[in-house]
């Protein structure tokens, strides 16, 4: 696994990504490219268009050119790596692929995005069937869209675009925001345990639909407790904490505490406080000191669906 895959998938559908256009999707729909989870496959499952694939598949091209899919990133950001996954496409995968990126402000139409300047981020590269292809990306420019080009045609199961979220927070000037939110630039930078699911799930958009969409640790058999550290969107003052244990019926933590970090300085935000299973909790915080990170301690182990830390950037 490449190092960049620990970063959020900026294109993921559950994080707001969308495949807004494609040159063709005759055999399998373009939206599958950014679905969460591993691609599935059931052999000898035929529909009106042939074998059913969990991916994007174009027709056999009989004229010059190549096929492409246009993806709006759910979270604009600096791209660190791309994964092109041809899982289950064994005789119908593209021979080659490339990826370009663009930055277009506002809410552009697909035609406006296609007309924008594009930057190559993955050069034309050979692909294999039924395989993940990892490509590191350099540069510090933030992008809003990517275009996957396949040469000349065929099927791709998933496109993953990993990177660092870089939102435009100027829209929030003078307003409060969730300083921990992944969409606002927050990131879990350290964690004691992620046996069952990723700790970055707790700062993902929306509500967790089930346990796997939160963070859950293994059962702790020794002393101590589990924890994670959230790097905030920026240095700020937190006024309200929301700790959500929804869907965690028998594996919610017994208690939680919050500690702000600002360099070497620690700021107690919330003392050890009892939690209930399957419950959204809200805690008004009384401190006024700015912090850059927050340590979330759960006692002794278990899971959280979401953590929201509302406040103001300094």
Image (cartoon, grey):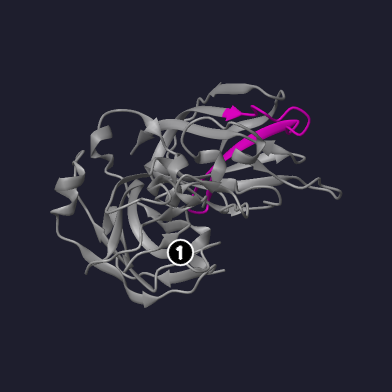
What quarter of the picture does the C terminus occupy? top left
Taking the image as shown, residue 172 lies to the left or right of residue 85, namely left
Write the residue at 49% across / 64% down. Answer: 86
Relative vertical location of residue 152 with respect to residue 232 in this rendering, above or below: below
Write the residue at 53% across / 59% down. Answer: 6
Question: In the image as oriented, which residue stretches furthest toward the front?
Answer: 48
Relative image position of residue 2 (x, y in whole percent): 52, 69
Question: In the image as oriented, which residue stretches furthest toward the bottom?
Answer: 126
Relative vertical location of residue 45 with respect to residue 82 in this rendering, above or below: above
Q: Nearer the viewer, residue 137 or 19?
A: 19
Write the residue at 29% across / 61% down. Answer: 67
Tell me if mark 1 has few (under 14), some (14-19) or many (20+) residues whose alpha carbon lies within 10 angstroms of its own.
Answer: some
Residue position marked by numbered label 1 in the rendering: 83
Q: Which residues are magenta?
A: 243-267
Taking the image as shown, residue 291 lies to the left or right of residue 117, namely right
Q: Is residue 78 visible?
A: yes
Relative image position of residue 294 (x, y in whole percent): 53, 43
Question: In the image as oriented, which residue stretches furthest toward the right?
Answer: 221
């Amino acid at each position: 696994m490449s190092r960049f895959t620990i970063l959020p998938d900026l294109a993921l559908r559950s994080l707001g990504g969308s495949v807004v256009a494609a040159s063709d999707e005759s055999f399998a729909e373009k939206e599958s490219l950014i679905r969460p989870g591993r691609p599935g496959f059931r052999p000898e499952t035929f529909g009106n268009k042939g074998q059913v694939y969990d991916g994007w598949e174009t027709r056999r091209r009989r004229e010059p050119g190549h096929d492409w899919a246009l993806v709006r990133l759910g979270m604009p950001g600096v791209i660190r790596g791309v994964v092109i996954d041809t899982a289950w496409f064994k005789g119908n995968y593209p021979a080659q692929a490339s990826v370009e990126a663009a930055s277009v402000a506002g809410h552009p139409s697909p035609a406006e995005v296609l007309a924008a300047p594009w930057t190559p981020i993955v050069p034309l590269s050979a692909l294999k069937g039924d395989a993940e292809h990892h490509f590191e990306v350099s540069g510090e420019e933030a992008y809003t869209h990517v275009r996957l080009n396949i040469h000349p045609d065929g099927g791709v199961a998933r496109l993953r675009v990993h990177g660092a979220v870089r939102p435009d927070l100027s829209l929030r000037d003078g307003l409060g925001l969730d300083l921990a939110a992944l969409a606002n630039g927050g990131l879990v930078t350290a964690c004691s345990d992620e046996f069952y699911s990723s700790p970055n799930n707790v700062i993902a958009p929306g509500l967790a639909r089930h346990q796997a969409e939160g963070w859950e640790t293994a059962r702790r058999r020794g002393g101590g407790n589990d924890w994670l550290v959230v790097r905030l969107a920026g240095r700020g003052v937190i006024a309200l904490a929301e700790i959500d244990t929804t869907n965690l019926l028998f594996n919610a933590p017994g208690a939680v505490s919050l500690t702000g970090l600002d360099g070497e300085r620690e700021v107690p935000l919330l003392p050890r406080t009892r939690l209930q299973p399957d419950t959204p909790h809200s805690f008004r915080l009384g401190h006024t000191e700015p912090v850059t990170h927050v340590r979330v301690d759960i006692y002794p182990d278990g899971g959280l669906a979401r953590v929201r830390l509302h406040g103001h950037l300094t």
